[in-house]
């Protein structure tokens, strides 16, 4: 069969590049080939297997179901080749390996410090970080674009291995001059009357808020104003546009400087967890094993800490 005998790494690299860039011209630059050469690589695979990998449109190249299967296979092969590189480096006594780390955007407030701490004790391991929202990380999981992921709730749509390395509290924040800033034991019914500034659909934070307010009639039909990042939410809360439901690990500077306050709300903070996630079946390299061990034993020491959050009653969101 052609797929087994003649498919080349160059063809897979071209397919990966087209999937990422959506345009042949950009993909060709990314793989160091001419546009006609990349087109030829694609055509060879499509013609030999009598299947379409991309649909051509004015917006660019859209990956078909078959194309996604090739992209995922290419990512898996990349992973195997990186493991081979790690083993050869170890045999040669050189660099112990490289880790591609996918980080959900909420974790970017502590992850750089964690990676720096790891690097101080593992100077022979290179760590490359990529930050994205939950949806982007799931896409990276599917296409094998990273080795280890730091995120909240592991996806159910992908077979993964995971472990918890720390608590992740979610809180309600407001500007210091908000009418509820000095109130105690604010009820769920009262807080639901406020305008919430929220993340996009599907985000772990938003799902937790939907669960929390699910029993309030009509609230889920008008949950709040959607925003695309934690930074936008924080700035908008400080400007008085509404209140935010946000990770406590993203607001340390704003709380210490008095630009935001954590509201004393019934059932808050909501305690979720931080997970270390890898694809099921992924062979763990020595470098990956070292990082996972560091994450398990030292990861939570890099979290911003708010003692008051851990003295109130809380409930799990998942």
Image (cartoon, grey):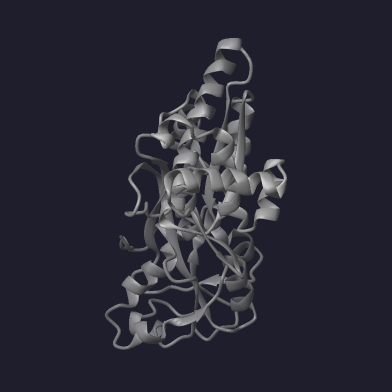
Above or below for 83 versus 69: above
Q: Residue at x 55, y 34 (%)?
A: 9
Quick check: can you spot residue 235? yes
The answer to which of 43 and 87 lies nearer the viewer is 43
Q: Is residue 65 toward the left or the right of residue 98 in the image? A: left
Rendered location of residue 98, percent (x, y): 58, 30
Q: Is residue 158 left or right of residue 56?
A: left
Identify the residue shown where x is 32% and y is 88%: 218
Furthest residue in direction left, as rendered: 215
Report x, y in % for residue 128: 61, 39
Residue at x-position 42% and y-position 52%: 66
Seen in the picture, residue 294 relative to 207 is either above or below; the reply is: above
Task: Give the mark count.
Answer: 0
Q: Position of residue 185 (x, y in %)?
A: 38, 76
Left or right of residue 55, residue 210 in this image: left
Placement of the N terminus among the 4 image quadrants: top left
Question: Measured from the top left, where is residue 38 in percent x and y?
Answer: 64, 46
Q: Is residue 14 left or right of residue 264?
A: right
Residue nearest the viewer, comparing 195 with 69: 69
Judge by depth and name the residue closer to the eye, 175 or 87. Answer: 87
In the picture, the quarter occupied by the C terminus is bottom left
* Residue 15 appears in the figure: no
Query: In the rendered image, which quarter is residue 192 located in?
Result: bottom left
Farthest top residue in view: 92
Seen in the picture, residue 297 relative to 70 is either above or below; the reply is above
Q: Is residue 242 above or below residue 291?
A: below
User: Could you say which is closer to the camera, residue 9 or residue 82?
Assistant: 9
């Amino acid at each position: 069969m052609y797929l087994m005998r003649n498919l080349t790494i160059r063809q897979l690299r071209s397919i990966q590049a087209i999937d990422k860039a959506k345009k042949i011209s950009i993909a060709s630059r990314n793989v160091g080939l001419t546009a006609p050469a990349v087109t030829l690589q694609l055509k060879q695979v499509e013609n030999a297997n009598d299947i379409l990998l991309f649909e051509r449109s004015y917006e660019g190249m859209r990956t078909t179901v078959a194309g996604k299967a090739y992209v995922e296979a290419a990512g898996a092969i990349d992973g195997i080749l990186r493991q081979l590189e790690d083993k050869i480096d170890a045999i040669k006594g050189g660099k112990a390996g490289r880790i591609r780390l996918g980080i959900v955007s909420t974790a970017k407030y502590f992850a750089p410090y964690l990676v720096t701490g790891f690097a101080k004790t593992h100077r022979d391991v290179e760590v490359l970080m990529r930050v994205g929202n939950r949806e982007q990380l799931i896409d990276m999981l599917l296409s094998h674009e990273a080795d280890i992921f730091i995120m909240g709730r592991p996806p159910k749509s992908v077979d993964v291995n995971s472990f918890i390395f720390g608590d992740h509290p979610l809180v309600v924040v407001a500007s210091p001059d908000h009418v509820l800033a000095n109130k105690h034991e604010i009820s769920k019914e009262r807080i639901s009357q406020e305008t919430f500034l929220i993340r996009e659909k599907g985000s772990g934070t938003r799902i937790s808020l939907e669960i929390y307010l699910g029993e309030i009639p009509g609230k889920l039909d008008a949950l709040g104003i959607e925003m695309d990042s934690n930074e936008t939410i924080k700035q908008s809360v400080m400007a008085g546009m509404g209140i935010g439901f946000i990770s406590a690990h993203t607001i340390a500077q704003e709380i210490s400087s008095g630009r935001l306050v954590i509201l004393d709300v019934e059932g808050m903070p909501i305690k979720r967890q931080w997970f270390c996630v890898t694809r099921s079946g992924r062979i763990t390299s020595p470098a990956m094993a070292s990082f996972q061990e560091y994450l398990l034993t030292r990861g939570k020491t890099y979290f911003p800490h708010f003692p008051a959050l851990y003295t109130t009653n809380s409930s799990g969101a998942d």
